Image: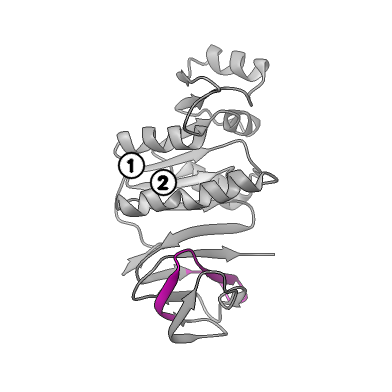
Amino acid sequence: MLFFSDMQETMKIIIVASGSFTPTPVIRRELSTADMIVAADGGAVHLKGISIDPDIIIGDLDSIDRASKDFFASRHIPVRTYPKKKDMTDTELCLDYALGQGAKEIVLMGMTGCRLDHTLANILMLRCLLEKGVTGRILDANNEIYLIDSDTTFDGSPGDLLSVIPVTQRVTGLTLEGLAYPLTDKTLDMGTALGVSNVFTGNTATVRLTSGMVVVTKSKD
C-alpha cells in the first residue's frame, strides 16, 4: 500500500507551469522541500513573483515575458528552448527532463486553470509516472490530484473533500474507508459520479481497488 503522507527518501522535483498559481502557505512549504525546481515556460514568471529561482527553464518560451527572460538570464538560470511547433507540451518536456534526472517524486504546480484541455491532459499525464513507479501529484490552491491503481492512504482533516473518479472502462473492488460515505467491493464504470464529493471523517482515508485506475482529488472549498 502506498502512503502519500510518508514518502521514502527520494529525489523530489517540482515542476511549475504557467496555469493558475496561488502561492499559499502549503505551496510555499512544498517548494521549500524540493531537490530541484523546473519551470515549464511561463511557470518561471510565477516563481519570479515569489522570489524563487528555478534550476532550469524548459519550453518554447511563448508564455514568458522579455523582462523575466532577461531577469533569469542575469541570474544564469539555464534554459532549454524548443520550437513552438512540437509534438510535446512544455509540461511533457519537463516531465521527461525530471525523469532523466532520476526523480522518484514529482509534484506538478500551475497545471490547472481556464484551459480545460491543458488541465485534463496534465491530470492524465500522471499515468506515465504511475507506470514508471514514480510518485506524482498535481497541487494547486484548492486541490491535490492523484492517479492511482492500487491501495492508497491519504492524509487529511475532518471535513476535507475526497473524490474518486474512474478513468478506465471499469474499476472493480473499490472500497473507501475513513469517509462519510464508505463503499465496499464496489464496481464502478467510467462516467459514473458516485465517488464525487465524499468527506473525511478523520485524519486519513483509504482507497482500495482490485483492478482499474481512478483519479483521486483531495479538495477544500
Q: Secondary structure at mark 2?
A: strand
Disc 1 marks which residue? 103
Q: Quadrant of residue 210?
A: bottom left
Q: Is residue 46 left or right of residue 40?
A: right
Q: Is residue 157 above or below residue 105?
A: below
Q: Which residues are magenta?
A: 155-175
Quadrant of the frame with the C terminus: bottom right
- The residue carrying pointer 1 sits among few (fewer than 14), some (14 to 19) or many (20 or more) residues within 10 Å by Cα, namely some
Residue 132 x, y percent position in the rendering: 30, 49
Q: Is residue 19 magenta?
A: no
User: Does residue 56 appear in this view?
Assistant: yes
Q: Residue at x 56, y 28 (%)?
A: 41
**What's the mark number on residue 106?**
2
Extreme front residue here? 169
Residue 186, position in %: x, y? 44, 84
Measuring 44% from the left and 27% from the top, which residue is drawn there? 55
> Are the residues at dot 2 and dot 1 in contact (C-beta closer than 8 Å)?
yes
| Image x and y of residue 67, in percent | 67, 16
Closer to the camera in the image, 156 or 80: 80
For badge 1, the amino acid type reads: Ala
Q: Amino acid at mark 2?
A: Ile
User: Residue 161 lies in magenta, yes or no?
Assistant: yes
Looking at the image, is 18 positioned above or below residue 199? Answer: above
Q: Considering the numbered disc 1 on the image, is that residue within a helix, a strand or a loop?
A: loop
Could you tell me what secondary structure mostly forms the magenta stretch? strand
